[in-house]
Amino acid sequence: MEEKLIAAWMAAREKAAALGVRLRPIAREEMMKAAHRSLTGSRLSDGFAQLREEGHLEWSLEALAVDKRFTALFSDEEANEALTRLLEAGYTF
């Protein structure tokens, strides 16, 4: 399941980059660590604010973290943080 999340996140990051969203590079083997770190910290995921401005929060890590395909990969706290960020940004499911 981790590989599917990583593939989905990489595809989302490619779409975001094509839109001009600035993203820091993440090595494939570090992506799960980066995801967990992002969702446990107080900082939004890379590009979140720009994705909100562009109307594409579905490409954010937060959206992937609450996607039913991937929720088992995240703790309840991480999923709740992702959901809170999305709802505060006005994301609709």
Image (cartoon, rainbow, N blue to C red):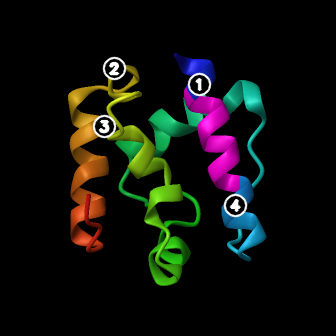
Q: Which residue is mark 2?
A: 72
Please name the residue that numbered disc 4 is placed on: 15
In this view, the mark in front (2 or 1): 1
Q: Which element type, helix, strand or loop, lies under badge 3?
A: helix
Q: Is residue 22 above or below residue 73?
A: below
Viewer-proximal residue among 82 and 4: 4
Q: Rounded to the nearest whole Å, what is the CA distance between mark 2 and mark 4? A: 25 Å
Callout 4 secondary element: helix
Mark 4 and mark 3: Cα distance apart in space: 24 Å
Mark closer to the observer (3, 1): 1
Amino acid type of the residue tagged 1 in the rendering: Lys
Q: In this rendering, does residue 59 appear at all?
A: yes
Q: Nearer the viewer, mark 2 or mark 3?
A: 2
Question: Which of the marked residues, 3 or 1, is nearer the chain's N terminus?
Answer: 1
User: Does residue 61 lie above or below 4 as drawn?
Assistant: below
Q: Quadrant of residue 34?
A: top right
Q: CA distance from mark 2 to mark 3?
A: 11 Å
Amino acid type of the residue that numbered disc 4 sits on in the rendered structure: Lys
Estimate the x, y position of residue 67 in percent, counting from the top left: 36, 39
Among numbered discs 2 and 1, the one appearing first in the sequence: 1
Q: Which residue is labeled 3 in the image?
A: 78
Q: Residues within 10 Å of mark 3 (few under 14, many from 20)?
A: many
- N-terminal-most mark, 2 or 3: 2
Segment colored magenta = 5-13
Q: Nearer the viewer, residue 38 or 48?
A: 48
Q: Amino acid at mark 3?
A: Glu
Magenta run includes residue 62: no
Give the amino acid at mark 2.
Ala
From the viewer's perspective, is 34 left or right of 87?
Answer: right
Task: Kindly identify the residue that appears in the image at 25 percent across and 51 percent down.
Answer: 83
